[in-house]
Amino acid sequence: MGDPTLDPHGKYNGREAEYVMQMLNRENDGDPRSWPQRFEEAFAKKLGVKYAVACNSGTSGLHMALFAAGVGPGDEVIGPALTVVMDAYAAIHLGATPVFADVDPDTFLIDPADVEKKITPKTKAIMVVSLEGLSVDMDPIMALAEKHNLIVIEDSAQTILGTYHGKQAGTMGHLGMYSFENKKHLTCGSEGGMVVSNDPELATRARKFGGIGYKHMTASAGRTHLALSTVQDPAYERFDTIGLNYRMNEISAAVGLAQLERIDEMVQRRRTVAGFFSDATSNCDWFQAQTTPDGYVNSYYTFAIKYQGAEKHGISWKDFYNQYVNAGGDGFYGACLIPYLEPALIGQTFGSVTCAKGLCPIAEDLQSRIMQFKTNYRNLQIAQGKAQILSDLIDNIGR
């Protein structure tokens, strides 16, 4: 139970403060495990995977996962065109080429048919991204991976507890990544992430890369226990992998563990809020909600729609945004720019890919239309009020 003196609508009203104080005072009740290890074990159990590796951000987790997959110079990594730029960054930092696949216009997610078109002898991995809380269509992706001997990495930064035919998003590929950045379903306070796998070799490689390359790191623990006489010996060899320090700190892990204890409640609240916005936009033919196919369960990082009001009523995306805000709404987010159109990448060439407009036309069109209504309200009455403002605005314009 959380502290009854805390704001019932607060973000950290579970055992976060208690766990942080335990960590600071080293009051672990005789538990020899570090807080990151405790968080990892609880997370793996919750998601039903064998191994979980905590890291300091979701971006770090992507880098770790691609390294674990053996991605290196000259390789190609296929990913969706509708996503954040960090997926491409992780491939580029390993010397690989990001190859962009187009997306399904209804689910907004990577199109397996276009993935297949982009596979070449240089393809090493497929990185799929579950957006807004909705899992990618994984069966055809895994079939392609098996056919072409590829590694699949699931970027499930936005999709904890989203499911696909009863399976947890992020657990169906060879590796999965979750983000605990401040706005995510579960947060470590500011930044944090987790890489998961059922493959001990992949998990070990990810952990070593994110743990400075310590040779005694294992899939399920930070390091094997060695006698002090061994590690204190000047001849002791510590590192067998060229890695980086992406390890999660103890305070972040303590906060994350407390958040994990309430994750079902927090995800359900987002689903409830999404329901308010779904009701508000129902029977409106110029608001097309992201489709959640049969057999999927959406965890609603946001409630996302494809806006078609410019064609229907001559109201641009920005004009509608301003009308909603002026009526008392909180605004909403647009989709991030297509990665290859971001200033960091546009005009650059990586392998056979030159970053320029026109590579993925469906994604480019969608990106300009998507509206993402936030679902992380902690007060449901406020959320319902914001949805009502949206409904009234739509009524005034005409459904």
Image (spheres, grey):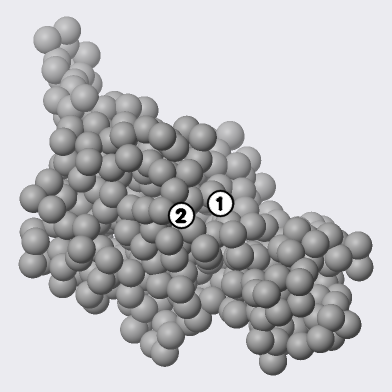
Asked which secondary structure carries label 2, the reply is loop
- Rendered image quadrant of residue 197: bottom left
Asked which secondary structure carries label 1, the reply is loop
Q: Residue at 69% x, 92% y: name it.
A: 283
* Vertical arrangement, residue 125 with respect to residue 293, above or below: above
* Vertical arrangement, residue 242 with respect to residue 345, above or below: above
Residue identifier under label 1: 336
Residue identifier under label 2: 83
* Vertical arrangement, residue 173 with respect to residue 292, above or below: above
| Quadrant in the picture for the C terminus | bottom right
Whole-percent x, y for residue 98 in the image: 30, 44
Viewer-nearest residue: 378 or 71: 71
Q: Is residue 287 left or right of residue 139?
A: right
First in sequence: mark 1 or mark 2? Answer: 2
| Quadrant in the picture for the N terminus | bottom right
Q: Residue furthest right?
A: 327
